Each structure stands twice: as C-alpha cells, then as structure tokens.
Amino acid sequence: MKNAALIRLPGRFPFVLLAALLSIFPAGCADRSASTPPVSSVPAASAEAPLRSMTPPPLVDRNVDILDTELQEWIPALIKKARIPGLQAALIRDGRIVLVRGFGVRNRKTQDPVTDGTIFEAASLTKPFFAYYVMKLIDQGVLELDKPLLGYIPVEMVEAGLGHPLSEPGFHREWLEKITIRHVLSHSAGTPHGESGKPFPLFFEPGTKWKYSADGYEFLQKIIEHLKGDRIDNLMRREVLEPLGMTRSCLVWKPEYEATMANGHDFFGRPIPYRKRTEAIASATLYTTAEDYAKFVVAVLEGRDLKPVTFKEMLTPQIDMDKDKGLGWSLGFGTQRDANGLALWQWGDYGVFRNYVIAYPEKKAGLVYLTNSFLGLSVCSDVVGRVLGGLATGNLALNYWPYDSPRYQYAWDVRDKGSAAAAELKELSRKNPGLFTLAYIKFLAESLSEAGLAPQSLAVLKAYAAERPQSGSARLELAKAYITMKDCKRARRELDKTRAAAEDKVESAAVDWYLDCVSSIEKPVRLDGEYLKKIAGNYGARHLLYKNGRLSYMRDGRDYPPEGQPLIAISPDTFFMENLLYFRIKVEFDASGNPVKLIGLYVEGLPPDESPRDK
C-alpha cells in the first residue's frame, strides 16, 4: 500500500471517496485509486454559500416540545427536497440531551425507517472523539502535549511507515522531529491528508500553518497502540465508550449492526452495501448514533474525566483556519467565534455519510446530526439554524453546495430527461457564472456513468465540449467517455482534437497515455492463464484476482463488485481498468521472475505508490 500515513495501516480507507474532487467538494475522507480522480486543491469560496454578517442567537429558550412538533413536519419535508434518505439528530440544552429523533429511511430500497437507534458512520466526527481520549492519556501521564512524537517509538517503526530512512535526500527530517500532539490534534503538523510520495511529504514547519490531516491522527494512533500494547478500538471501548455509556458505538463493525445500520447513499441516491470495518482508524471509523455521540459532546462540555487545565487547553483555539471568518482549530475540534461566543464544530464526510456537530461551551448547548447521504451537508445551515440556532460557519466555509443549488437541479434533470436536459447547460452557465466548471462536469459525467446512465453522461460531456470547441480539457473528457464505451474510432478522433486544441491545452504525454488505452482495446494483449495465475495474489490492501481466464483488481475499503474490476493489459506487466483510466497497475518482478510488488501509476504526473506482495 502507499505510504499514506507515517505508520502504515493495512487496508486503510484513505480520504475522500466519492468526493475526491476537491475542486468541487472540500476534503473529507481518497485513495488515488478510488472511483474518482484525485485533485489537491480546496475550492475557492462559493457564491452559493455566502457567509452571513449577522449571526442569529442559539435557540436555548425555545420550548423543546413545540420545537419537536415542528421538526417532525419540517425535517421530513426538508430531506425530501434535498433528496437525503435519512437523518438523525440529537439536541443538547443546559448540558443535557433533550431531544433525539430519526427521520426518513435507512435504505431507500427497503424503506426501513431511521429510528433513534439506527447506526451511522460518523466519518471525521471520529477525530474529536479520539482527541478526547488523547487528552485523558495526557492526564494519566502516558502522553505529553508538547513532547516530539518521535520520542515515543523506535526509529525503525517510523522509517517503515515513511517508506525510507530519515536521512532520505529531500525529506524534511527537521520538521518531523518537531511534531507534537498539539500539532496533530490542531491540524498544524503539516502532515499529509492522503497525499503520498518519496520522500514522504511534509508541507510546512509544524505550528506555522493549518492543513487538515487524517494521517497525523493515524500516526498518533499507532504511537498509542505501541505504548499501550492494544488496538485503539479496545482501548477506547474500555476507557471512553463504556464510561460514557455509548452502548451503541464502536470503532469497528459489530455483527449486531446488521439489524440497525443505515446504508450510505451515493450522489444519485443508490444505497451502498455496508462498509464493515475490521480495523479501527482513529480519524474516521466510528459507528455511532446521534444520541451516543451527543453523550460524548456533553462530556466535553462538562470537561468530564479531564483535569481543569487539560479541559481548558482542549477547548482553546491553537491555530487559525480562516481568521477572517473567525475559524480556527482547538485540540480536536474546529472553533468559530461569532456573536454567540466560542463554538466547537466538526464535519464528517465519508462520501455516502455526511454529518455535522456544533456546540457552544458557555451555553452548554449543541447539536449532532448524522445522514446516510452524499448530500447530507447540503442542509447543514438549515438544520443548525432551525434546530440549535446560531450559524454553521464551518460548513459554509467548506463550500458544500446548498440543496437548492442549480448544480443539483441540472444533475437530476439530466438523469431523468436525458440529452434534452443536458443541452440546457449553455443557458444555465450563462445564468450561473462559475458554477458549471470542468471539474463539476467531470464529476457529474462520472456519477452518471457509475449509475449506469452512460448515454446521459455522454450527453453532458458533448454539451460541455460544444460550448468550448477549442478546449483541450473538454475534448479529453469526451475522449475518455468514448474509451469507456469502447468506441475507439470516436475516442481517437477526440484525442486528435485534444492534441490540436488552442485552449486548455493537455500535455502530449497525457494524450499518449489514453491512446495506449485505445490501442489495448483495439488489439488486446493476450496473456497466458498460468502467467496470470502467477501474478495474482495479495499485495497489502491491493489484490489481483484470477478467475475464468481474466485478471481483476480489488482494493480494501472499495465498493468494487465481489469479483473485482476487470483489468485490460497494456503490456505483460501493466494493466488498466476501463472505468478508471487515469490509474494503472504495474507488476514488478525480482531477478528470479517472481512478482514482488504492485506499483500504482497515475496520468496526472503524481508520484507512483507501491504495494509489496504479501509474504
């Protein structure tokens, strides 16, 4: 597997799955060989989600019974408009959980209802939960807030996780040696968030900037497991879950969840099979309910089981995330300062589960809401404003589209009406400048294709290319669609136009990459079955499967079919997937001709990553 964390986590599910297009959605939780192509930038501020200058006060005096009655009508209507299957919420007032409600359905196909006991994936809401445990360990003397992390574990463990020695040329060893728990919990360590490479990427001197990073949390997880001699799920069960009475929660899958778990739903509302995590990840894998998670929030608001000085330290902003918007980060939670005082917040985004928590420590008021939908954060401002009061500034700054965005409406219209609706792109772009970008069109086309709507996907790409006939990038996307459809003649034609385009030029190496795919479809490379059996096997989190004369690819944590994704050979040692054209797998052999590793290759020029074959 790639060196996506300082200490490797086998089978790790890296961050942002369905929302890997960060130029459209903010960073949540993506392996670059996932179902969407990787990008590295956070989007610019969205005109659809302006920050309001006036912050409404929390509704701390609103009668709960009246509010409950209103919500039982308002939330079902809201999630219906937003196309969110299910939502679960817990409201905190005066340091007590005063309201818990489930709305909608666990699974759009079965129509099983969401109840107070329905289990959701918490996604990144796991991070502050883990941070609370870390602060308890500081009180116990197991950890120190400002001690460099390299002082806790052997150098060999660190170098194994990095994938190279600390002395690797170009590696910022001096930065790594400065990273502390304070930096990790406040996302100011400069560690990656799914990025990889050699040398291992560190982005700035610790404590000087803010950069969201799951990898730092996972590094700290492995340190704690090393010091305590047990897995993090066992440790947190005994030391956090049980003391707080979070009886429905766990960092790994439990068999009893089969009866109560919500299915996540993708962009077009298709239910996704349960993701049964067998390995805990401190940044992401908590299974929980809104009520259980609210028990944790209440404990934080009280400072329960923490020394006063530790409690104060945990809630104190450590670094600015966006100073102009009053956003920062404490030791675990995001912070916002507005007319209501200091608020703690965190968003959760595991693609098909999107969630939010916000709490005002001084008022001991807060809200937790969980959804089983890719669209779950499109209603964040509405839900927070109506149920808790105040403003979800963090969510607004992350630029999730509101549920009534023209982008969503265009997607639904294309899905339902086909090419006629796709042709409306020109007028919509004129009315909504800056919304219908190439990144969005790529995302929409891929989502339609994944939903089995290839004609609609092609129609969207044609409409976009028609408006930008000289755009190399637009032509390339159309060419890729034809490759996926195995229409090699049209694919070659569009690749020729890509190379000759006067605007949005595409590098010749990228055009050649896709031409290789076309050639491999036109003239398949025939490989002997015994050879394919030889290279089939387990390579860490990656797997090559041989069945019925074909080689297929699987990766842990992916929503691939049980038989894997069929591979097409470019050469005897290099393969691609027809629905994942930017990514290739190369098999590396030792001097005796035995396969020893898989190398992931990427058209974007990103560094390759390696997965050694299991012994």
Image (cartoon, rainbow, N blue to C red):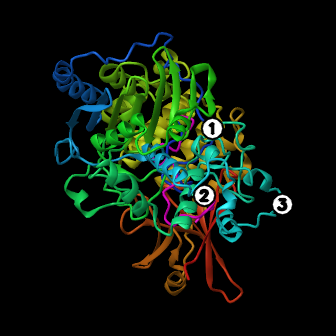
- Residue 104 is situated, as x and y percent measured from the top left of the image, at 21, 36
Instruction: Please give left or right for residue 332 compared with residue 320 in the image.
Output: left
**Figure quadrant of residue 376:** top left
Q: Which mark is residue 4?
A: 2
Q: Name the residue type under label 3.
A: Pro
**Magenta part of the chain:** 1-25
In the image, residue 241 sits, relative to residue 458, either above or below, namely below
Q: Which mark is residue 41?
A: 1
Neighbor class of circle 3 (other Cα within 10 Å; few <14, some 14-19, many 20+) is few
Magenta span: chief secondary structure: loop
Instruction: Please give left or right for residue 232 compared with residue 494 in the image.
Output: left
Rendered-image quadrant of the N terminus: bottom right
Residue 387 belongs to magenta span: no
Neighbor class of circle 2 (other Cα within 10 Å; few <14, some 14-19, many 20+) is many
Residue at 63% across, 51% down? 195
Q: Which residue is mark 3?
A: 169
